[in-house]
Amino acid sequence: MLSVQQNDKDHVAGQRQSGQMGNNLLAYVAMQSGQFHQSISKNQQQLEQNFGLSFSRGAISEAQGRVISEATKIAECGRYPHRHCLAL
C-alpha cells in the first residue's frame, strides 16, 4: 500500500485543494484512476478511508488533469526532444 508522507498531510491540513496535493497523493490518484479504472467518487472514498483526507470531486479531477498534462509532456520529449524538455 502506498503511504502518505507526513509532509503531504501537513500540506493539505488547512487547504483542501488539488494544488495542495503532494507528489505521493498525485501519484496515488493517478494510479487509482488509470491503472485501476476507479471513478472520481471511488477515488474520493479511497482517500478518505486510507488516509483520512477529504477532497472535492473537482479537486480530484484537477489532480488527474495535472498528472496527465505532465505525462504528456514527458512522452512528447521522448519523441521530439527539444530545449524545453531539458527543463523537465
Image (cartoon, rainbow, N blue to C red):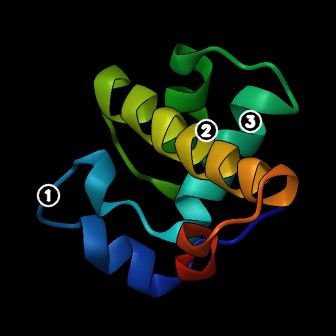
Apparent side of residue 76 relative to residue 14 in the rendered image (left or right): right
Apparent side of residue 14 relative to residue 47 in the rendered image (left or right): left
* Residue at which label 2 appears: 68
> Which residue occupies 23% across, 48% down?
17
Amino acid under disc 3: Gln
> Which residue occupies 74% across, 48% down?
76
Q: How many neighbours does mark 3 have within 10 angstroms: few (below 14), some (14-19), or many (20 or more)? A: some
How far apart marks 2 and 3 lie (CA) works out to: 13 Å
Q: Nearer the viewer, mark 1 or mark 2?
A: 2
Q: 52 above or below 48?
A: below
Apparent side of residue 49 relative to residue 75 in the rendered image (left or right): left
> Which residue occupies 74% across, 59% down?
77
Mark toward the start of the polypeptide (2 vs 3): 3
Amino acid under disc 1: Gln
Q: Quadrant of the N terminus?
A: bottom right
Residue 83 place in picture, x, y as percent: 59, 74
* Residue at which label 3 appears: 32
Residue 28 place in picture, x, y as percent: 67, 52
> Which residue occupies 53% across, 69% down?
84
